[in-house]
Image (tube, rainbow, N blue to C red):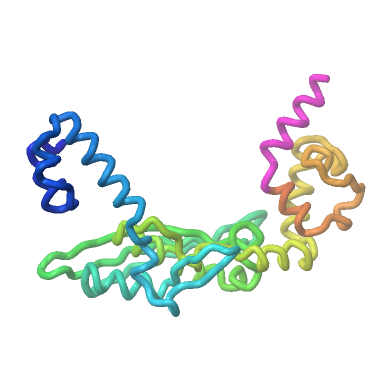
Amino acid sequence: MAKRASTMRKELSEIHGANQEDVAKMSDDEVRVKFEEITMEEQKDAPSDLCLFYDNEKATKNGVEYVKINGLRRVAQDKIGTIIDQHIETSPIFEEGKMSGAIATMTITFLQGDLRRTFSDAADCRPYYNSGWDFGKYSVSSAVTRAEARIYRKALNLNIVAAEEVMDSEEEEVVTNSQPTTDLQKRIIEKFISDNKTTLKDVLVAIKKEPVDDISLLNFESAREIIKSQTEIKEYLKGKEVK
């Protein structure tokens, strides 16, 4: 419900430090405008959510500062209450009959005084999609960690992301530039080419990559881009058929 002009007058002088005599001379509309200006300025200058965390609970990736899971867990218990129950469900992600990642769904219950508060969320971890290669080796535990981080962020109403949810650009560069094309990638691409009655060359032209005939000549990055861009490639192939 919107505040009354009389309430805004009182808050302008008593909370926001405006001169009481100047406020008294303002019309109701002027009070509303002044109140909005001051509160917007204060929100702009307000400390970020990261100020809740210690330096050793933060990490910098890609030039951006994020909070670690241990910091989120500490602040959640400080602000909300003790964790009294956790429930985790995990399931593998299969592509072409081979496990390629994991999804985790998690529920955490806090005890806040006599009140039980329960929050749930889910996350996935898939190497070469949203995780570094090392994290991909432990996709189940990584997915659980991400789901836990999202619960704390939701419970605390934080406008920040956990470090464990973000793939480092250096990590990604190592993955894309040094890893060979995987067998799973090859099978997905071969099936896509067969299903759409096209060629590898046309697929690569669609994503503006240098065309090659042999799928074994693809690098990891190109293979990943093909898999991610299947919808766009199909549109390109349809347009080619029309011409």
Residue at 78%, 55% in the rendered image:
186
Residue at 23%, 38% in the rendered image:
34
From the viewer's perspective, is residue 27 above or below residue 39? above
Q: Is residue 222 magenta?
A: no
Answer whether residue 95 is visible to the viewer in this image.
yes
Question: Which residue lies most toward the bottom here?
Answer: 56
Q: Quadrant of residue 126?
A: bottom right
- Main SS class of the magenta portion in the image: helix
Q: Nearer the viewer, residue 191 or 115?
A: 115
> Is residue 56 shown left or right of residue 92?
left
From the viewer's perspective, is residue 14 above or below residue 21? below
Answer whether residue 101 is visible to the viewer in this image.
no
- List x then y, in percent, for residue 161: 45, 60
Q: How many marks?
A: 0
Residue at 39%, 77% in the rendered image:
54
Question: Which residue lies most toward the top here?
Answer: 242
- List x then y, in percent, for residue 29: 18, 29
> Is residue 130 shown left or right of residue 214?
left
Image quadrant occupied by the C terminus = top right
Q: Quadrant of residue 37?
A: top left
Residue at 50%, 66% in the rendered image:
65
Q: Is residue 229 magenta?
A: yes
- List x then y, in percent, for residue 188: 72, 51
Image quadrant occupied by the N terminus = top left
- List x then y, in percent, for residue 222: 78, 52
In the image, the segment drawn in magenta is: 228-243
Q: Nearer the viewer, residue 173 or 14?
A: 14
Question: Which residue lies most toward the front here?
Answer: 21
